[in-house]
Amino acid sequence: MQNNEKAVRPAAQAVIFLLILSAAGLGAYLIFKTRTKITPEKASKLVPAVETLVVKLEDRPVIVENYGNVVPETSSQIISEVPGKITRFDINKGEGFKKGKTLLEIDRRDYQIALETARASVAAAEVNLDKELAQADVAKREWRELHPDKEPANPLVFRIPQVNEAEAALESAKARLEKAKLDLNRTRISMPFNGILTEKLKEEGEYIAPGEPAGKVYSTEIFNVEVPLRDEDLQWFAVGGRNGGEVQVEAEFAGDKYSWLGRAARNAGRVNRGTRMVTVIVEIRKKGFEGSGLIPLPGMFVKARFIGDERENIAAVPSTAVHNMKEVWVANTEDQLEIRKVKVLRIDRKFAYISEGLKDGEKIITSMIDSPVEGMKINPAGSESKQSEQN
C-alpha cells in the first residue's frame, strides 16, 4: 500500500507542471496576438530657430574701452622750512582749500624780531659806509693838496680797503634782511594750487622742525587715469600733445553715475613685461569735470572710452556674432544660412567693427547653431531685432 502511494505522487507532480507550462504558453500567445501595432512615422526635419540683427552701416569712430585708476596729477606734502610751534592748522582731513590760502602758521614772534634786527643792521651798515666814503673824500683832498702830480703807492691813503669793507658789510646786512623776510614769510604755509588735505600729521601747539611734514595734499585741478591697453589699440586714436584723442571717463559712485571728459595725454613710456600692455595716461582738466557734481576721486576705478578716428560704412555687431575672427552667419532672403567672410577692423568685449563683407539692411544671426552648414534652412521668424547702437 505504501509503495502504491509513492508511485502516484511523482505522476501527480508531473501533471501539475505540464498544466502550468500550458497556461504560460497560452498567455504569451494571447499577449503576442493582441499587442498594439506601432506604425513608425516619418521624422520631421528640424529647422533651428535663430535670433537675427539688422545690419546698419554708419560712419562711426572706432571706440577703444578699458578700465583704469584715477590718480592726481600733483600730490604734495605740507613741509615747514623753519622751526617753531604751530599756532594755526585749522583745516581738517578731507577738506578742500584754495590756491594761496594759509593752511598752517608757525609762531611768528621770533621771526618778526629777527626781521627788525636785520633792518637795524642794514641801517647801521649804511651809516658806516657813508662815514667811510666821507673820510675817503677828505683823504683824497688832503693828498691832492700836498701831492697834486703824484698818486699814492698805498691804497690805505685813500681809505679804499675801509670803503670796500663797509660796502661788503652793507651787502651782508641786506642779505640777512632778505633772509629774515623769507623766514617770516615761511611761517605761513600755503599751496600753489586748489586741493584737498588727505592726511594731517601735526596739530596746533606741536613743534615742527625744518623739513618735517605736517600733512599731505593733492591738487584738484588736473587728474590722470592710468589705462592699460594693447599696443595695437593705439593705432585708432592720437596720443600726446594738444591733439590727444578725446576720452570719455565714466564712473559709478554712491549709487550715481558720473561722466567726465579727458584726453589721451601721453603713454607711460614702457611696455609691461608681464601683460605686454601699454599704459596710456588720460588727463582730465578742471573744465572736463566742472558741473558734473563730483570731481574724479583718487583711487576710483573708472571706464575710459577712447574716441578714435572716424571710419566710413562700418557695421558694429556683437562680438559673439563673429566666428573664427573672419566669418559671420547671414540669414538670406530665403531663410537659409549663409556663411559670409568679412573684414573685421577691430573687435573688443562687446562689439566687432566690420568694414567689408556686409550690406546695409542684411540680417546676421546672433544666436548659436550647433552644426552650421552653408544653405541650411533656418527659422528667423519672430526673432528679428534692429541694430543696437554702441553706447
Image: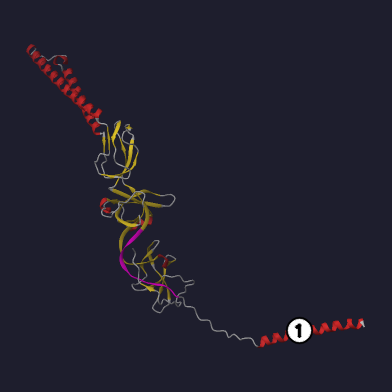
Place residue 96 in its image quadrant: top left
Q: Which quadrant would the N terminus be assigned to in this image?
A: bottom right
Depth order, front residue of 172/150: 172
Depth order, front residue of 220/68: 220
Q: In the picture shown, does residue 332 fall above or below 273?
A: below
**At numbered mark 1, what does the secondary structure look like: helix, strand or loop?**
helix
**Label 1 sits on what residue type?**
Leu
Q: In this orientation, does residue 115 appear?
A: yes
Residue at 38% x, 78% y is 333
- Left or right of 37 on screen, residue 149: left
Give the extent of the magenta segment: 49-64
Q: In this orientation, does residue 175 appear?
A: no
Q: In the picture shown, does residue 357 fall above or below 176?
A: below
Residue beneath label 1, please? 21
Place residue 4 in its image quadrant: bottom right
x and y percent of residue 279 in the render?
37, 51
Place residue 308 in its image quadrant: bottom left
Residue at 76% x, 83% y is 20
- Count the numbered circles shown: 1
What secondary structure is the stretch in magenta mostly built from? Answer: strand
Tell me the crowding category of disc 1: few under 14, some 14 to 19, or many 20 or more residues within 10 angstroms, Cα based: few
Q: Which quadrant would the C terminus be assigned to in this image?
A: bottom left
Extreme residue in the front direction: 1
Depth order, front residue of 80/126: 80
x and y percent of residue 219 in the render?
29, 45
Instruction: Please check the rendered image and state whether residue 147 is part of the magenta-colored stretch, yes or no.
Output: no
Residue at 8% x, 11% y is 146
